């Protein structure tokens, strides 16, 4: 049965099954012969001979605007395009690539496919809830073939919400779809986005078992979304969902429970306000494509544009397990997705030379291309690297260092047990040791005497090694860090709520990792150690502990197959205090860490490589192209207002003498529910020591 | 069991992760995802000391190769006992990058006993087509000799020479520890367990306070 599902979910084949979840039954059906084939099928066919998706037509959503782009881009970028395509540019669609989202913009096809699906899949829908009208209309019929009962887990997941879901009881056997040409042998191994189900950490069987349930969850959520859209007089048609209701707590909750996969690209675009950026920069991307074309002709392009080669090396190292990025052995040409990825990344490196190309952006752009057309993906990449992850991908990586400093502040505040693994509290009692230990990497021996005042927050400018792991979470926005469905749920919230959500998720993962640490042999001793301040106990080596944490953090998130394991068990729990973190607090922390790092720059830079010495110069002149680094421009407004009575001590103790800036977590003002007793105890111990 | 910290350095896509993957899991992927940040793995080798088997555990830091990640490198190589500096024998630039890593290690790591192993990867590509080679073995070998580095050409794809790298490093470090053990037995933290009674200093920098104090 599961095989059938997966086959169906992927039924459209390459470029189709991708962003077409099973909830989109009609979309998975190969192109109706009545629909004219407009896109570059020649090149597609040559790539994927056995792939039904190749026959799918691609429509543009906005011909007048986007054809302009694609014409410019195609004419020179894809000389192999067939003349008929170039001759009918207005029909090519805005997507000079063949990204999946092309299919989204295809109303007619959808309708046709939909009608076909009803003919072809007479269903025996058996709905047990009052929304049957809606659902029968909107849920692809074939989905009701699943004879799966909803798990108790899912029920629980939804009970804490007022938008209680209607749960389907589907007991019908799954008929085989006659329309699926791709062999189940191939298709069953890939998920609905084209990613291989199996990973080093998850077996295909585990995936299938989980997906059987999560698939039902997705259907229920989509029905909820449809109702919400209709209440707001908005289109809920997969092909024309462009606008979304005004922001509200309810909508936020809906987003947190997952945007329907087939609406994702447009939802991200809408919530991130991509259209505004595009409108303000009409013609920019086509111009960049022209520039790329010009560069391609230069004899010394590698020297003038060193990013080109680095990008080239990473193209085939971007989602090598995703069929859309793979070149089949029989293919002579590289996949369209790879071409799009190259164009987006090269265009970006030209557009923002301060960032150029940074490894990890290949994953950001790659994921965007699975959900949006090329130009929109480009602008979303611009937004990600400026608004959501300011400075993170800069040449000096200062932004990611700042964010890691902020994360460390958050861990210290909210997850003291984890913090003990990162910076054991006994270090505070032995400043020389601490300095030597922490400096050994940077070897600034004369630092010891200078930093007596500031070594309490030394971790802000001498980041602990665990941040080498957590930094990648931010750089790639959790793509590849977590299984894909979890990453996508995070992206939903990121674009709706802002970058502070990344910190919440990071804290959530760290909190979940506590369970893993518990299993470790050191846990008892370290807990005992920190609680009693027993400095004579030498049962553990701080570095070993941190490495243990590191190893857990780099592997266990990859096993978090079910998004609701982190969303429902952590993110939705109001009593977990870090869930109340908001953008303002994170921005304030970012400003604080930025200032601290600038102040301590001479220390941090001692004996470091020259590439690291111009951090602040780059940082300050970073806005040559994009000036809306709003996340970092936040100034220290109202800091004192937020510095709580409770937090004053610990906050103050982190400040070098004479510093007026500070950070504070609002949560300290209200109650600290999470393990407050332990936290209090740790503070007391620290207070005594100091 | 002895434990050593080893760091992989080198230009992007020279095959650092592939070498580790071959060593740790004895597998190879034609296309590996780019390493973002760093990865941490461990694997053991067994070396012979007379008729005794000594287990040596490597804690391996695999790093991102792009230039801009270089500023993070001190975090990886601090306290390292060994460094694997990798280049691609089909990419001339990559040897230059490797040499700059060697230079940095020699300047920044205080440990005189740091074992640096220069590795030319992708030797499989030249098996059928020697023209693909752009870095002469002699050139790299000469550089290695002049700078006191261990050297070999390997292939992560076929596995050729991979195990031997770690075997050799293990043996080298073991000999160093043995010597140190006879001369200096007091301030060092004992991280040896089991078969061999040996005092293993850790970290390998001269900063003795950074071990389990």
Image: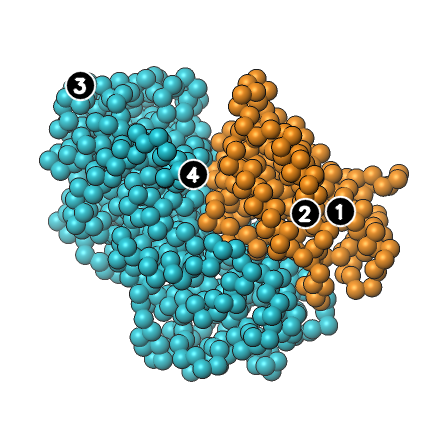
Chain colours: A cyan, B orange
The label on residue B173 is 1
Q: CA distance from mark 2 to mark 4?
A: 27 Å
Kindly identify which chain the residue marked by label 4 belongs to: A
Tell me if label 3 and label 1 are in contact, CB under 8 Å: no
Q: Is residue B190 above or below residue A432?
A: above
Kindly identify which chain the residue marked by label 3 belongs to: A
Q: Secondary structure at mark 3?
A: helix
Tell me if label 3 and label 4 are in contact, CB under 8 Å: no
Q: Residues within 10 Å of mark 3 (few under 14, many from 20)?
A: few
Q: Secondary structure at mark 2?
A: strand
Q: CA distance from mark 2 to mark 3?
A: 60 Å
Q: Which residue has dot 4 on it?
A: A310
Q: CA distance from mark 3 to mark 1?
A: 66 Å
Residue placed at 73% from the left, 72% from the top? A536
Q: Position of residue A149 (x, y in %)?
A: 39, 40
Q: Is residue A388 left or right of residue B149?
A: left
Of B60 and A394, which appears nearest the observer? A394
Q: In terms of image quadrants, where is residue A57?
A: top left
Residue placed at 68% from the left, 41% from the top? B146
Q: Position of residue B80 (x, y in %)?
A: 66, 52
Of A386 and A366, which appears nearest the observer? A386
Q: Which residue has dot 3 on it?
A: A84
Which of the two labelled residues, at mark 3 and mark 4, occupies the earlier sequence position? Answer: 3
């Amino acid at each position: 049965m599961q095989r059938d599902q997966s086959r169906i979910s992927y039924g459209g084949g390459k470029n189709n099954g991708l962003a077409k979840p099973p909830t989109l039954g009609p979309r998975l059906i190969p192109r109706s012969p009545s629909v004219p084939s407009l896109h570059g099928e020649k090149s597609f066919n040559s790539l994927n001979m056995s792939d039904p998706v190749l026959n799918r037509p691609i429509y543009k959503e906005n011909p007048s605007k986007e054809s302009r782009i694609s014409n410019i881009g195609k004419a020179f970028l894809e000389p192999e395009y067939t003349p008929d395509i170039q001759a009918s540019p207005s029909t090519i669609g805005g997507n000079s690539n063949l990204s999946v989202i092309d299919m989204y913009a295809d109303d007619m096809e959808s309708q046709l496919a939909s009608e076909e699906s009803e003919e072809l899949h007479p269903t025996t829908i058996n709905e047990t809830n009052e929304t049957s009208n809606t659902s029968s209309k909107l849920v692809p019929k074939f989905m009701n073939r699943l004879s799966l009962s909803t798990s108790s887990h899912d029920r629980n997941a939804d009970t804490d919400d007022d938008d209680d879901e209607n749960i389907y009881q589907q007991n019908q056997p799954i008929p085989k779809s006659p329309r699926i040409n791709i062999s189940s042998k191939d298709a069953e191994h890939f998920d609905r986005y084209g990613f291989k189900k199996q990973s080093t950490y998850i077996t295909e069987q585990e995936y299938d078992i989980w997906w059987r349930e999560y698939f039902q969850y997705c259907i229920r959520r989509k029905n909820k979304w449809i109702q919400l859209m209709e209440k707001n007089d908005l289109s809920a048609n997969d092909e024309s969902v462009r606008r979304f209701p005004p922001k509200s707590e309810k909508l936020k909750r809906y987003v947190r429970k997952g945007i329907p996969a087939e609406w994702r690209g447009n939802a991200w675009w809408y919530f991130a306000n991509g259209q505004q950026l595009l409108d303000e920069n009409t013609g920019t991307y086509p111009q960049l494509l022209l520039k790329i074309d010009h560069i391609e002709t230069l004899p010394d392009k590698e020297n003038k544009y060193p990013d080109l080669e680095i990008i080239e090396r990473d193209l085939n190292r971007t989602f090598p397990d995703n069929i859309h990025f793979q070149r089949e052995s029989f293919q002579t040409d590289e996949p369209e997705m790879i071409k799009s990825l190259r164009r987006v990344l090269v265009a970006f490196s030209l557009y923002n030379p301060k960032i150029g190309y940074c490894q990890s952006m290949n994953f950001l752009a790659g994921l965007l291309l699975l959900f949006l057309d090329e130009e929109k993906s480009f602008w979303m990449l611009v937004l990600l690297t400026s608004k959501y992850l300011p400075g993170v991908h800069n040449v000096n990586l200062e932004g990611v260092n700042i964010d890691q400093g902020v994360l460390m502040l958050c861990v210290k505040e909210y997850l003291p047990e984890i913090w003990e693994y990162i910076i054991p509290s006994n270090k505070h009692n032995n400043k020389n040791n601490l300095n030597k230990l922490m400096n050994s990497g940077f070897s600034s021996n004369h630092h010891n005497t200078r930093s007596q005042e500031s070594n309490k927050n030394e971790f802000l400018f001498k980041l602990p090694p665990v941040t080498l792991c957590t930094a990648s979470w931010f750089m790639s926005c959790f793509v590849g860090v977590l299984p894909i469905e979890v990453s996508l749920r995070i992206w939903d919230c990121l674009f709706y709520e802002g970058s502070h959500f990344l910190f919440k998720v990071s804290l959530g993962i760290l909190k979940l990792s506590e369970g893993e640490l518990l299993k470790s042999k050191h846990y008892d001793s370290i807990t005992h150690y920190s609680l009693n301040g027993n400095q004579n106990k030498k049962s553990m080596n701080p570095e070993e502990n941190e490495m243990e944490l590191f190893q857990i953090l780099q592997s266990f998130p990859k096993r978090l197959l079910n998004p609701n394991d982190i969303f429902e068990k952590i993110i939705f729990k109001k009593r977990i205090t870090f869930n109340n973190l908001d953008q303002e607090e994170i921005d304030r922390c970012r400003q604080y860490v930025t200032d601290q790092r600038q102040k301590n720059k001479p220390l941090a830079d001692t004996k470091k490589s020259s590439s690291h010495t111009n951090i602040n110069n780059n940082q300050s002149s970073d806005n040559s192209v994009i000036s809306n680094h709003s996340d970092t421009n936040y100034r220290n407004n109202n800091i004192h207002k937020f510095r709580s009575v409770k937090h004053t001590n610990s906050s103050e103790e982190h400040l070098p003498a004479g510093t007026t800036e500070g950070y504070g977590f609002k949560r300290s003002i209200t109650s600290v529910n999470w393990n407050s007793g332990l936290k209090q105890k740790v503070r007391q111990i620290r207070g005594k020591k100091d | 069991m002895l434990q050593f910290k080893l760091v992989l350095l080198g230009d992007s896509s020279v095959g650092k992760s592939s070498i580790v993957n071959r060593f740790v899991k004895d597998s190879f992927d034609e296309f590996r995802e780019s390493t973002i940040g760093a990865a941490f793995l461990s694997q053991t080798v067994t070396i012979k000391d007379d008729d005794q088997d000594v287990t040596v555990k490597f804690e391996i830091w695999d790093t991102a190769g792009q230039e801009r990640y270089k500023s993070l490198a001190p975090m990886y190589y601090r306290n390292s006992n060994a460094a694997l500096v990798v280049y691609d024998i089909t990419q001339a630039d990559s040897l230059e990058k490797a040499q700059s890593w060697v230079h940095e290690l020699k300047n920044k790591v205080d440990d005189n006993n740091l074992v640096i192993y220069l590795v030319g990867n992708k030797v499989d590509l030249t098996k059928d087509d020697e023209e693909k080679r752009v870095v002469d073995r002699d050139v790299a070998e000469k550089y290695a000799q002049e700078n006191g580095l261990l050297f070999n050409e390997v292939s992560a794809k076929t596995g050729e020479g991979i195990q031997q790298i770690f075997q050799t490093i293990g043996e080298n470090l073991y000999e160093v520890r043995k010597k140190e053990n006879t001369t200096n037995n007091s301030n060092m933290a004992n991280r040896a367990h089991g078969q061999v009674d040996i005092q293993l200093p850790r970290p390998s920098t001269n900063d003795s306070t950074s071990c389990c104090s």
